[in-house]
Amino acid sequence: MLGASLLPHEYTHSWNGKFRRPYDLWTPNFNVPERDDLLWVYEGLTNYYGMVLAARSGLWTPQQFREAMAATTASMTFRPGRQWRPLQDTADEASILYYVPGSWATWRRQVDFYAEGTLLWLDVDTKIRALTHGRKSLDDFARQFFGIHPGSPVTVTYTFDDIVKALNRVAPYDWAGFLRTRLDYVGNALPEADGLARAGWKLGFTDTPDSYQKAMAVQSHAFNQMYGAGLLVSDKDGRVIDVLWDGPAFKAGLAPNMQILAVDGKTWSRDVLADALRAAAQSKQPLSLLVKNLGYVSTLKLDWTGGLRYPVLQRVAGTPDRLDAIAAPRR
């Protein structure tokens, strides 16, 4: 299930990245360095269409598409590193961020031009649909922007201004301002959240994982409670993989590569931690964690009483469901 969007992602690259490529990612020889400030198009738009085409082709059901979008939205909503690093900088620093360790990802940020770039293009897509009262969409932009020079193998480059001009041909608007306010935003909010709302949905949370979350847990061999207690921990041995910056686990003193040995006096297991989190939601008492770090053992208090939390999309009453329209097969 998780890999269903990979084939349409790479297929999309045949025209976004291979045929048409950001101007500074095309270089005449190996002595000229590549620049990657437009990776939010190269990868962000490709990632968006990878998900959309997975749904349109039937590789995902509409429900699975929404589950994947919920996971994407949650991962980018919980990004306190946005306080200092904007989306644009994740593209500019891609050559570094591709290879950094996974720990402290929510503060340092990673190659977020994939996931947040996906939400950016959902924002663009729903804005076009709203401006044109449903008569046009991002598909119209893609058709005229990438559907040029049929059969030609010669790469055609593009700039930020080219993207803005093409969007304006589809639906006149201040697209330069629209994009820059999202690419350069620094703060606590998710600047692309309007796109999901415009699609008729909002991010919510439940105590039960959906099929997408279950698949992610199996693939990663990890228990993900980043959106609640604020930690990601290995199923195998209780090793802390990461913590949410300034979240409950962070404030308790947990850090990547520590190992949880016991929870409330019980030997570590995924189920023991899950049961303890559920119980804390009722007792309103902090969890007692026996933790090993650098050969030393200590007890930490995890003050989180919100139980288990998994992302889910919820319909916004009284709004058009543009998300299902986006995922519907083309005739």
Image (cartoon, rainbow, N blue to C red):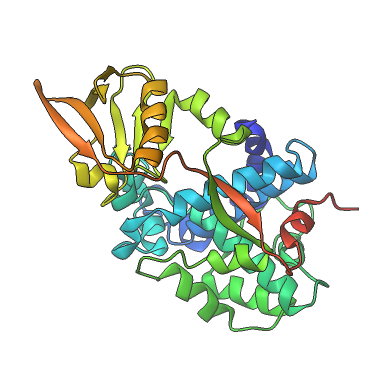
- Specify whether residue 35 is in view: no
- On the image, the x and y values in percent for residue 118 come to 57, 55
Q: Residue lying at the far right in this picture: please name it.
A: 331
Left or right: 181 in relation to 327: left
Give the mark count. 0
- Specify whether residue 225 is in view: yes
Q: Using the image as rendered, state which of residue 283 and residue 330 is in the foreground.
A: 283
Q: Residue lying at the far left in this picture: please name it.
A: 296
Residue at 37 percent of width and 64 percent of height: 86
Query: Which quadrant of the figure contains the N terminus?
Result: top right
Q: Using the image as rendered, state which of residue 162 and residue 310 is in the foreground.
A: 310
- On the image, the x and y values in percent for residue 243 come to 30, 41
Q: Residue lying at the far front in this picture: please name it.
A: 283
Left or right: 191 in relation to 260: right
Left or right: 69 in relation to 28: right
Is residue 280 shown above or below 163? above
Q: Quadrant of residue 166?
A: bottom right
- On the image, the x and y values in percent for residue 57 come to 79, 41
Q: Using the image as rendered, state which of residue 278 and residue 120 is in the foreground.
A: 278
- On the image, the x and y values in percent for residue 210 come to 60, 36
Is residue 223 shown above or below 41? above
